[in-house]
Image (spheres, rainbow, N blue to C red):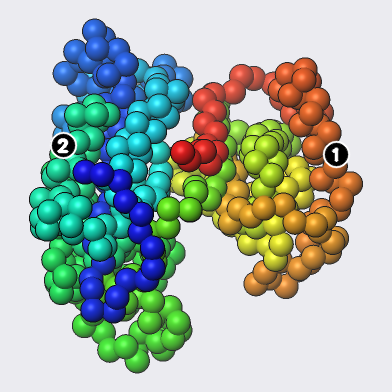
Amino acid sequence: MPGAAFHGPTPMNRHRSILLVDCDTFFVQVARLEDPQGAGRAPLLMVGGSAEGRGVVTSADYRVREHGVRSGMPMARAVELCPEAMVVPVPRDACLRRSRAVRAVLDRVAPVVQAASIDEFYLDLTGTERLFEGAPLEATAHRIRERILDEAEITVSIGGGTTRLVAKLAVERAKPAGAHIVAPGQEEAFLRSHPVGAIPGIGPVFLEKLAERGIRSVEELLAVEPEWLARWFGAERASWLRDRARGIDPSPVDAGTERKSISSERTFARDLEAPERLAAELHRAVLEVGGGLRRRGLGARTVTVKIRDHDFRTRQASRTLALPVASDRAIFRVARELLDELRARRPVPVRLLGVGLSSLEGEGPALQLELPVTGGDDPVGIESEADLSLAKAADALRKRFGRDALVPGRILERPGSMGRRDTHEPEEEG
């Protein structure tokens, strides 16, 4: 299957051909490949943090999942559910290497490839029928799946259809190691078999609002008159909701789109409750994501704070700014306000704390102070040229003398040991 170039718009009378390639239990697969004599021979395997500490499950093989183990679950609880399973740490470098190997295969067989994450890739095969000898999309998906297994040694599942949305839902029907294609014209029928929460973009709050109206499935949603949806949720949101419920999704597969977020989160060895301790850990996370942001010459318009309470309830809050920020001071100020909002709603001990930056853009001119937040009423001092210069100077010192060469006092004043830290930055493509 030779590579190809794809240019120009899709003709109106031609359906798009979109595939989503999802690497099955990716971290488990890589762990087995990297340690064939250990993890490779374990009949039951979990990948993640230590069971003795406060780590969580990153991935588990399908047999372990039959015991009720899920990603994000505390590893101690997962071991209780499946004590026979071997637990190994995430092989981060190897995962990146294997992900690039999968991407290399896809770049040779598809004209447009977009990485959605380290283990998910969208393909747009529209107009490439001759490359695959006119084969049906399902047959093409199987050929791609076999080629990835042969060349990258990774097993994948593939979902497909005329939109990214349909491909995303179809891949769940393909697992494990299969392909599921929704034929043109069958999008709405396919969506009707799903709960409304399966539609990407419907978060927990919106899901609760839908449930209050008796809407829990796509079937129930489509039974509601559009006028009532508009009255309940607003015309724009109602239109978006009905389109997605029918499988309509105009978003393109964009080969130039990179991951648009940087995040860092930390699970604590002991639950934290004191405001000064939480502020210190928040500041530490801000330094990590801020440094990653500036290394790539980027600014972020959206700041998100995530916390997991002592009872494992996960909550988050976000704020989108009118212009991107890149200094630690500006990011911390917004993040601190978000943390305070979350804590005011539920002031209980915290098990995990994280900061995420998204809506990433190239660095612009220095921002003005007292710049209003998009969609908000309260002005927030964002950053000055001095803020950005100071942050970059601190980056240079840490690069030369080590990460702890310049650490704010609020971080140094922290008794006790910290748990696992996970930092995720946009990966370089190519």
| Percent x, y of residue 192 | 17, 70
The front one of 100 and 337 is 100
Amino acid type, residue under disc 1 in the picture: Leu
C-alpha gap between disc 2 and disc 1: 51 Å
Residue drawn 73% across the image and 19% down it:
402
Q: Residue furthest top?
A: 37
- Residue 58 image-quadrant placement: top left
| Percent x, y of residue 29 | 26, 26
**Residue on which disc 1 sits:** 390
- Residue 359 image-quadrant placement: bottom right
The front one of 21 and 46 is 21
Where disc 2 sits, the SS reads helix
Residue drawn 76% across the image and 68% down it:
372
Q: Residues within 10 Å of mark 1 (few under 14, many from 20)?
A: some
The front one of 26 and 195 is 26
In the depicted structure, whether residue 117 falls above or below residue 239 = above
| Percent x, y of residue 411 | 74, 29
Where disc 1 sits, the SS reads helix
In the depicted structure, whether residue 162 falls above or below residue 58 = below
Which of the two labelled residues, at mark 2 and mark 1, occupies the earlier sequence position?
2
Q: Is residue 411 left or right of residue 100?
A: right
**Residue on which disc 2 sits:** 146
Amino acid type, residue under disc 2 in the picture: Glu
Q: Residues within 10 Å of mark 2 (few under 14, many from 20)?
A: some
| Percent x, y of residue 213 | 32, 77
Residue drawn 55% across the image and 33% down it:
423
Q: Which mark is residue 349?
A: none
Residue drawn 30% across the image and 46% down it:
3
- Residue 405 image-quadrant placement: top right
Can residue 404 be seen by looking at this rendering? no
> In the rendered image, which quarter contains the N terminus?
top left
In the depicted structure, whether residue 35 falls above or below residue 279 = above
